[in-house]
Image (cartoon, coloured by chain):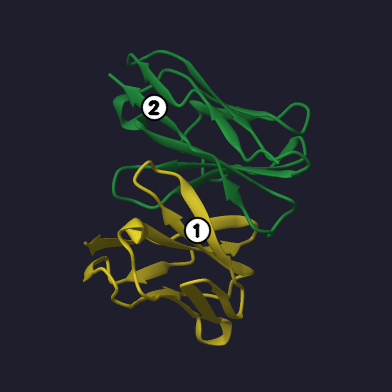
Chain colours: A green, B yellow
Amino acid sequence: GAGVSQTPSNKVTEKGKYVELRCDPISGHTALYWYRQSLGQGPEFLIYFQGTGAADDSGLPNDRFFAVRPEGSVSTLKIQRTERGDSAVYLCASSSGPGNEQYFGPGTRLTVT
Amino acid sequence: GIQVEQSPPDLILQEGANSTLRCNFSDSVNNLQWFHQNPWGQLINLFYIPSGTKQNGRLSATTVATERYSLLYISSSQTTDSGVYFCAVNRDDKIIFGKGTRLHILP
């Protein structure tokens, strides 16, 4: 079956703008995760959904970041008033349940100019 | 929080050589995964290995959970093995990644 997909693959935006990044998990996977990867670093956890609810959002850096998963499938990561420091690759992963093997999408490369 | 340390940070090898990558973690974990990040940035699952030993072709991995480390073995390396190898541990339902080992295989 299809893997995790993310759109767009690249996003360039100006400082102060609002962006939305989308993740389509593997069909049937109940757990969905967002990570952020800066150059030369490993991915860092942002938020984890189990079903529709955010089970753990402790990795979100500040209140400009928000994520939703209204129907327990597709998720959207929303960033308000973008800053140059938000530039990174945003990765989404899904798994069949908490603690199970995670599968990653190709990522969205966000550049804030 | 839990710390994940990978070594070596960089490794350059000739094609055909064998290598061992190490991952140490500072506390007990629920499970552990090894990934290969290819030059296009895609994270490819190699092993899901909370404990024991697994093999897949030229790659194998061993996790000794009681001693808080895991090893990834690559035998007869090929240029396509180049990239960054990440160890990631699962604790309380979120993954914590190490900083990776950057592997470069010379033809």
- Which residue shows up at 41% across the image and 13% down it? A17
Q: Are marks 2 and 1 in contact (CB under 8 Å)?
A: no
Tell me if A100 is positioned left or right of A5 in this view: right
Q: Nearer the viewer, mark 2 or mark 1?
A: 2
x and y, in percent, of residue A83 in the image: 34, 24
Residue type at mark 1 is Ile
Query: Quadrant location of the C terminus of chain B?
Result: bottom left
Count the marks. Answer: 2
x and y, in percent, of residue B46 in the image: 52, 62
- Which residue shows up at 27% across the image and 66% down it? B9
Q: Which mark is residue B15?
A: none
- Which residue shows up at 34% across the image and 42% down it? A38
Residue type at mark 2 is Leu
Q: Chain of mark 2?
A: A
Dot 2: element: strand
Tell me if A68 is positioned left or right of A65 in this view: right
Mark 2 vs mark 1, CA separation in Å: 22 Å
In this view of the protein, which residue sits in the foreground, B10 or B78?
B78
Does A18 sit above or below residue B53? above
Tell me if B38 is positioned left or right of B60 in this view: left
Does A29 sit above or below residue A13? below
x and y, in percent, of residue A3 in the image: 63, 40
- Residues packed near mark 2 inside 10 Å, few (<14), some (14 to 19) or many (20 plus): many
In this view of the protein, which residue sits in the foreground, B1 or A8?
A8
- Residues packed near mark 1 inside 10 Å, few (<14), some (14 to 19) or many (20 plus): many
The answer to whether tags 2 and 1 share a subunit is no
Q: Which residue is mark 2?
A: A110
Q: Quadrant of residue A111?
A: top left
Q: Chain of mark 1?
A: B
Dot 1: element: strand
Q: Which residue is mark 1?
A: B96
Does B94 sit above or below residue A69? below
